[in-house]
Image (tube, rainbow, N blue to C red):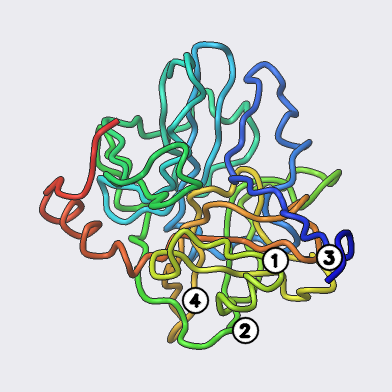
Amino acid sequence: MQEGNAQEIRRPFIQNHGRIADISEVNEFSQIPLIIGGKKVPKKLLKSMARIVVEREDGFLSSCTGSVVSRNYVLCAAHCFVLPSKALVRRSYVLVGEPSTKIKYFESPQNKYFVRNVWIHRKYKDNSLFKHDVALIQLQKKIDKKLYKPMALGAAPDEGRSKLTAAGYGVKGSNKGEPKRARRASVLYQEWDTCNEEAGYPIANSEKSEICYTSLKFPNKGKTGTCFGDSGGPITKKENGEYIQVGITSFFVGDLCESPGAIFVAQRVENYLKQINRKVKKNQSKGWKRL
């Protein structure tokens, strides 16, 4: 091969789905794409979801999505709580029971539960490209039984191109209005060979601990997917009418969330199931570290 004739492989951006906003900007959430496409989340799934808010001393807040796994714990992504250097947390809390997406709703809702502790996977590091990007939020008090239904956790599909449901809080897409409630969108679970081929290089930290998914119209259109603010949210399959969480929204590879060839990556729930159950059911901290 002659010098200069080699095909250039463009490395897409790797970005997390965390959401940062200025608390003073009431309409800030209408400026950022979150769940791409999709519809309102059905109540059966909504009662297993939580909106996570971290208020900072510098006047900014970060917003993520989580899933309620017990009256005391919410499952989320670790990077939602790893703040920029010198940033200090003022307070953090979760909202359950169909919370609105509007910032003014954060002031004094009845379904606000403050965070006691945040437990992240002991191997997670902020500079590790989201490897083991898993966290459990321990609440100060138990969630009212009427407000939630514990999320069922399970294994990802056995075959690629299986339809999954991604859910989170936020606007419907770039330059679109703010929805009143959480949104859900259908996405395609893919084999890692497909995701790596589209990206042009291996993107998984570990294929055992992560899953990849794409838009339903992949690779031609980016009509559905996840984006900033959906971090920590559930990627689910449906069995016998029930939603079962198989992934935790983590990051995407591409220029924009809406890019036709965007690849989305979630932490594989099945890989962490034993650790989650030990902490939630037995309060055993093996495998976790407290922030």
Marked residue nearer the N-terminal end (2 or 1): 2
| Residue found 72% across the figure and 54% down from its top | 11
SS label for mark 1: loop
Q: Quadrant of the N terminus?
A: bottom right
Marks 1 and 4, the one that precedes in the sequence: 1
Q: Disc 3 to disc 1, how far (Cα)?
A: 11 Å
Question: Which residue type does callout 2 highlight?
Answer: Arg
Q: Which residue is mark 3?
A: 7
Q: Which of pointers 4 and 3 lies earlier in the amino acid sequence?
A: 3
Q: Which residue is mark 1?
A: 200
Is label 2 or label 1 in front? 1
User: 23 and 284: which one is in front?
Assistant: 284
Where residue 175 sits, quadrant-wise, is top right
> Helix, strand or loop at disc 3?
loop
Q: Which residue is mark 2?
A: 161
- The reply to whether callout 3 and callout 1 are in contact (CB within 8 Å) is no
Q: Are marks 2 and 1 in contact (CB under 8 Å)?
A: no
Labels 4 and 2 touching (C-beta < 8 A): no
Disc 1: CA contacts within 10 A as few (<14), some (14-19) or many (>=20): few
The residue tagged 4 is: 237
